[in-house]
Amino acid sequence: MAGTTRRGRLIADINVTPLVDIMLVLLIIFMLTANLIAKQSIEVELPKASSGSTVEPTTLGITLTKAGKLFLNGEAVNADGLRNAVSGAMAKDEKAQAIIAADRLTSHGRVVWVIDLVKQAGIASFAINIDPSALISPQEQEDSEG
């Protein structure tokens, strides 16, 4: 009878040998196909030049204080000045990017306004600057203040 031994007991153990065999075959197949997929690009050896350099995109540092003042790269600026500076940076460099830093007490709406201004000027790549050492949840902050 299938599934029993000569003494009449049932075999309750799972035989994992076929499973390991299948997994090894799949691993070999994935290793071979990954090598073929990675080599679909055209391999060329680029020429070297002593005067060449990498071009870093223009980065604009925009700061918004809790008093509502705007700063561009450390210099005070108004909304129109910021708009003109961002548009000028985009005219010079299509890959210009912005880093927006705002005081934690600044209203959310004011930060969104700055982000909207930057995006309207054409900058698609921006980041919001944070202090990672002071990350606590808003609930923990309210509990510690109250």
Image: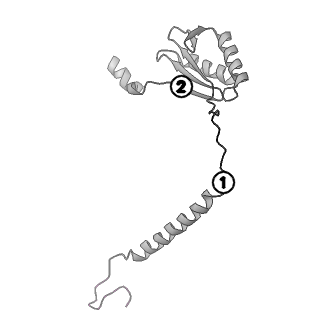
Quarter of the image with the C terminus is top left
128 with respect to 83 (left or right): left
Q: Which residues are magenta?
A: 1-11
Q: Quadrant of residue 137?
A: top left
Q: Amino acid at mark 1?
A: Glu
Q: Is residue 125 visible?
A: yes
Q: State the SS at label 1.
A: loop
Most common SS among magenta residues: loop
Observer-nearest of 121 and 9: 121
Q: Which mark is residue 131?
A: none
What residue is shown with label 2?
128
Q: Residue at x 67, y 15 (%)?
A: 85
Q: Is residue 34 magenta?
A: no
15 with respect to 22 (left or right): left
What residue is shown with label 1?
43
Q: State the SS at label 2.
A: strand
Q: Is residue 136 visible?
A: no
